[in-house]
Image (spheres, grey):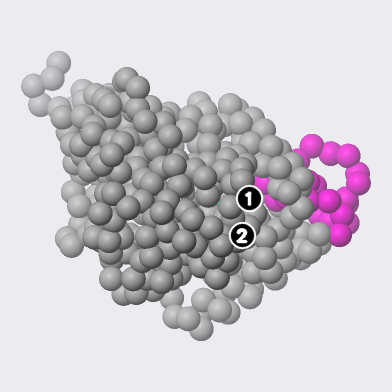
Amino acid sequence: MTREGKGEPARAPRGILSRGRDPLALLSAEFDGVHDVWRSASGMVCVAGPESARAVLGNRDAVVAEASDFYRTRHGDFGPRAAQIRIGRAARALMRRHLDLRRRELPDLVTELLSPSSVWPDAGNLLVFRHLRDVLLHPDAPPQLHSTVEQIVHRAVLAGARRRHSPVSRLLFRRRALNVLHTEIRSRQRGFGVAHEPRDLLDVVVDESGPGSDPKDLAEVFLSFLFAAVGSVGFALGWSVYLLGTHPDRLAAEPSWTVREALRLWPVAWLFARTPSQVQELGGTEVAPRDQLAVCTYLVHRHPGYWERPDEFVPERWASAVPDGAYLPFGHGPHTCAGATVTMRLLEDLVELVTRDRRLSVTPHDGAGPQVGPALAPPRFTAVLTDRSDCPGRR
Ligand code: HEM
């Protein structure tokens, strides 16, 4: 059960991801910095220009078929749009409440899970999972469901987890896990119409989807939340820690600059799938409904026409005006991430806790590069945290 396995941001990534070569290297080699839209060797039409990317994702002129990678299920997009919007709003409100209530737990969690050393990116995902666990599933949810969600994190959300299990074992696990989720969703649907505050994100999905929704679709929407909250947030934290640890001269940067710069260089959501609605010209290339568009924010964020020193980690650039229109880590337009603000706040808090009063050192594991899948995960590395008061020569 990967993001692809649940049918999420499947179309564009699959074409580009399945070619056996590093897709980032492939796309970077194809992009000449001038032609912002082109037909890639992968067979997709790639979009690397900020204007075209915003035109596609914003979709004001209906240039693409309405779609959201977040709500994509095996049966098409979960809908209607009104339900998507209700779910996004209610999820954001619940997350915000949870983060407000639990913020004070973060320092102890960082000490417990990261000191003195930790192996990443898993450490980031597991830290975020511990912090968000009760908002994903409330503590009174059935123990079997808790254990299933925990297994999904270990078998599908962590970077590279998929490779650690055979296809048969993945298929069997997927069936078992979805059965458990469907049973719980059906049971919660039986209480539909009885007014109550949502206790967790599964309640949000069930309550706001309206009566009669297919439990299979709702399970996939819930999994999107799990992948976003534990996977994407954990990877973004991992990138921030990795970049700070490999650029010790930048350790004093404002946490908010670090997080923004990490998401610029390594946007976790780096590739968006869309389909043109009709034959039309996009950034100088003719596209048609049979084409698959792949909007690549990795390239948009490093576009040489918009960014100075695009490939360098320069958190200080965020101290002054940046080309906002060329920065889309949470998407753009109607489907912009509903969790963007809460995510940024959590990431900034965590980066501050990891770096404040501590010395951070990072050792990349041999041969490790970015782990490229539907989400862009950092390489494997070990992070060592030392209290500054323990450093020799410090009083
Ligand atoms: C670093 C963490 C995250 C990143 C990089 C991220 C990125 C994105 C992106 C790029 C989209 C747009 C997808 C598209 O246009 O096809 C999106 C949509 C969405 N995200 Fe996030 N996300 C993150 C965390 C979260 C969290 C924690 C939540 C939970 C509240 C969340 C909830 C949503 C929802 C509900 C949507 C669908 C919005 C809509 O279509 O109306 N995301 N996210």
Of the pair 6 and 318, the residue shown nearer to us: 318
The number of numbered badges drawn on the structure is: 2
Q: Mark 1 — residue?
A: 62
Q: CA distance from mark 1 to mark 2?
A: 7 Å
Q: Is mark 1 within 8 Å of ligand 1?
A: no
Disc 2 element = loop
Q: Which residue is found at the position 10% from the left and 26% from the top?
A: 392
Q: Which residue is found at the position 27% from the left and 61% from the top?
A: 30
Disc 2 marks which amino acid? Ser
Q: Which residue is found at the position 81% from the left and 59% from the top?
A: 213
Highlighted range, magenta = 188-212
* Residue 7 located left or right of residue 140: left
Identify the image quadrant of the N terminus.
bottom right
Q: Which residue is found at the position 70% from the left and 58% from the top?
A: 78
Q: Mark 2 — residue?
A: 277
Q: Earlier in the sequence, mark 1 or mark 2?
A: 1
Labelled disc at residue 78: none
